[in-house]
Amino acid sequence: MLLESLRREVLEANREIARRGLAPHTFGNASGIDRMGVDGSGREPLVVIKPSGVDYASLTPADLVVTDLAGKIVEGSLRPSSDLDTHTLLYREFPSIGGIVHTHSEFATSWAQANRPIPCLGTTHADYFHGPVPVTEPLTAEEVAEAYVRSTGAVIVRRFRRDRLDPVAVPGVLVAGHAPFAWGRSPSEAVEHADVLEYIARLAWRSILLQASEAGIPAYVSEYHYLRKHGPKATYGQPENSGSH
Amino acid sequence: MLLESLRREVLEANREIARRGLAPHTFGNASGIDRMGVDGSGREPLVVIKPSGVDYASLTPADLVVTDLAGKIVEGSLRPSSDLDTHTLLYREFPSIGGIVHTHSEFATSWAQANRPIPCLGTTHADYFHGPVPVTEPLTAEEVAEAYVRSTGAVIVRRFRRDRLDPVAVPGVLVAGHAPFAWGRSPSEAVEHADVLEYIARLAWRSILLQASEAGIPAYVSEYHYLRKHGPKATYGQPENSGSH
Amino acid sequence: MLLESLRREVLEANREIARRGLAPHTFGNASGIDRMGVDGSGREPLVVIKPSGVDYASLTPADLVVTDLAGKIVEGSLRPSSDLDTHTLLYREFPSIGGIVHTHSEFATSWAQANRPIPCLGTTHADYFHGPVPVTEPLTAEEVAEAYVRSTGAVIVRRFRRDRLDPVAVPGVLVAGHAPFAWGRSPSEAVEHADVLEYIARLAWRSILLQASEAGIPAYVSEYHYLRKHGPKATYGQPENSGSH
Amino acid sequence: MLLESLRREVLEANREIARRGLAPHTFGNASGIDRMGVDGSGREPLVVIKPSGVDYASLTPADLVVTDLAGKIVEGSLRPSSDLDTHTLLYREFPSIGGIVHTHSEFATSWAQANRPIPCLGTTHADYFHGPVPVTEPLTAEEVAEAYVRSTGAVIVRRFRRDRLDPVAVPGVLVAGHAPFAWGRSPSEAVEHADVLEYIARLAWRSILLQASEAGIPAYVSEYHYLRKHGPKATYGQPENSGSH
């Protein structure tokens, strides 16, 4: 039951990637996690993820692959997304997140390819990301050779640890020379964050070409904006919706 | 009656923001003012505004919030847009305007994030804005702490006073590090100006990247263009429509 | 009869401006000329043009305005496009053209606002324009004061005369600080040229930002491309269509 | 029979060029080759190609032109694409390819007009192209005069030979001052590669404007990505689809 509902939400998030134009061809995937197990019995968490190389348009709930947190397939006859090991590692390391979306969206990927974090230049950014969108270090030759996909998760986690970033306050990252990952409390929030990340990447790209200072907006402004949506005194949205923007 | 008609026009302006792609997600809002009161009796003016954080697609007339010029809710069960205090302050300070539209449209926001006014580089601009599109000063830490949203209105008004700008001749502004506001005699004219502002921001951005001079077109050209649409000798459009472009 | 057919073609060209996104709002207009008179009797040529400030979507054949080459209205109850005097002057000076389209299309206008001709950087350009797309001189204060719209036509003609350009080989121009005009043997060819002009403006803008040399492609290449479509030995398209690309 | 199926696939690839917006007007064409002959009898290979200057929307299977590898028309009453001699030369020189697509897509053409190869800046690129997308030398005056279209094929082949490139690992090229050609094992794979080429051209253009290093990603990363899709140990996509991405 719960798993069925998660399957539908993951399917919808994958379709939303396509509808919003965040990933041409099959360059993208969404997953979700049921941390309680299918029956709330506390059994091992299950991850639902897109199969590899399947077109978004033809995706059905039955195509989705269910794995445990070690990546072992529990249900599904198709091969899971080739990025599975990044997803499972992030779910293990970031206990507060419930959905992950990976895209190759145009502007966020362009920043990732330039190995540059996206500075916080305005309130659109500050409403969703607390501080710059970070960029990872490049993978080393050893990391690529040993476990490329898992290492992609590892460099993300390393970046968050080194800079003491909170994955709730910074719901996404750029993988250097690759593309963005975004996440949220649910698959639908993850895809919303992936879309906002693309939009702030567009805005920042255009502002930087107008010689905007990379210092960005003052900390007291970004603090205010972040807290009005996320703090205990949130004033944005309707009270009953305060968690969903 | 009058208020019902204003509700419909404000709803339509909010939908137009979405249709024209001026504000992804819920980054935008439109309002209108009935300066005469609902029965023309001269009672206090009423403002109709979008509720906070509600998706454009699902918006109905009943969702709109009615307030007085001090921002006190007169009708409506939802929380008004978090930008309400900016709208009411502008209605109080600019008596000639009847509608306000706030967006995070891509190119206008990119100029706002770069803290740069949009120079008047051509006749598309000159037909709608008399001179550059101004940019405000950044808010101070005190302004943010005391009354962020009202202060956003205050820095707009300060900019217009300091430079002796007429809100009819300059129907919009960039708030530094934030995004544009546009206005007009009605909500529908306000959204038209928000859309034109985005278009001239696109044109100017591309011209500046071709090393266009920021001095822009000669004053005698911008004067001519502005007056052919707005002066007593306006020659643009049909006589019966001369007020609506 | 002939005039009715011209009305339909001019209406269609105006709608095509909107469909191709070449002019937001009412920033654009198309016209056509019947150089033979309505009955082929050799009476004075008639120009059919869009009325001023009317939305493309609501335009009907009866809305179009018919004038003589001096701009005197022969048929129609609406005020003609405010750019009429530019159109009639071009029809008088360029006897080989049968249709004119004026737009504020984004990239062509951005070049016009930067007062820069569009260099011929590739074969897409060379297939339609023989050499760079020229840019006019700015209008003087006297020209603006005396007859702004007619002077816009005059600076175009002056540019073609000074550089000995053939309006068949160079079917368009950028008016400095304003926007493009394009033309062709018919209104439908004019709108095709307006659309191609926008596309080559996009390509050149992106190439120049990659530091392309403004010298452009060698003359022997642009000559070859132009002649394969336009010379007596044209090899492009089907024989029966050789005139329509 | 086989030829009918190839006709349908070539028609579909031509329509896909239009649907994906890779070639405005008639700036583009797709072809396919049946290397076995219509009856598998080993008779001479046949090429199916778009006719010249015909709009994509109105194209029917019967409009397609069938030629031999020397470009002699075998079936069809319309004149073949003016680029036919480039296609036939590539089919003769690159025996591993089964379909060719030529477009004037915006970003790839902008790189071609700047005479710059597209550096490999990320994994989106590395998944499809092994190393930079090469750019040809400009054609000489003699080559243009003697056989322009065949020489376009010749400069492509020369570039691949000089740099020892494998057309399977590098499924496309930029012709200097002109536009891209892409290819694949079939017409449908060729149009997919033309579309990916446009996307990586967009990404690289934006990254370069953010001052990305042209050195691009380390060789051990591009090697890994290329091999996971193309090598004997491919792990991307479903096993039964491993050849089609």
Image (cartoon, coloured by chain):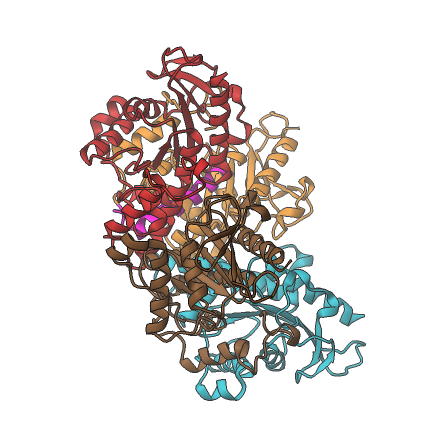
Chain colours: A cyan, B orange, C red, D brown
The percent coordinates of residue B201 (x first, y second) are 39, 46
Taking the spot 49% from the left edge, 84% from the top edge, the residue there is A144
User: What span is in magenta?
Assistant: B190-214
- Left or right of residue D134: residue D13: right
The percent coordinates of residue A104 (x first, y second) are 52, 66
Res A73 seen here: yes
> Which residue is at the front of the view, C39 or C101?
C39
- Left or right of residue A130: residue C243: left
Q: Is B127 included in the stretch rendered in magenta?
A: no
| In the depicted structure, whether residue C223 falls above or below residue C101 | below
Chief SS of the magenta region: helix
| In the depicted structure, whether residue B14 falls above or below residue C35 | below
Q: Is B212 included in the stretch rendered in magenta?
A: yes
Which corner quadrant of the image does residue B124 belong to?
top left
Taking the spot 38% from the left edge, 29% from the top edge, the residue there is C185
The percent coordinates of residue A83 (x first, y second) are 58, 76
Res B130 seen here: no
Furthest-left residue in this view = C162
> Which residue is at the front of the view, D190 or C59?
D190
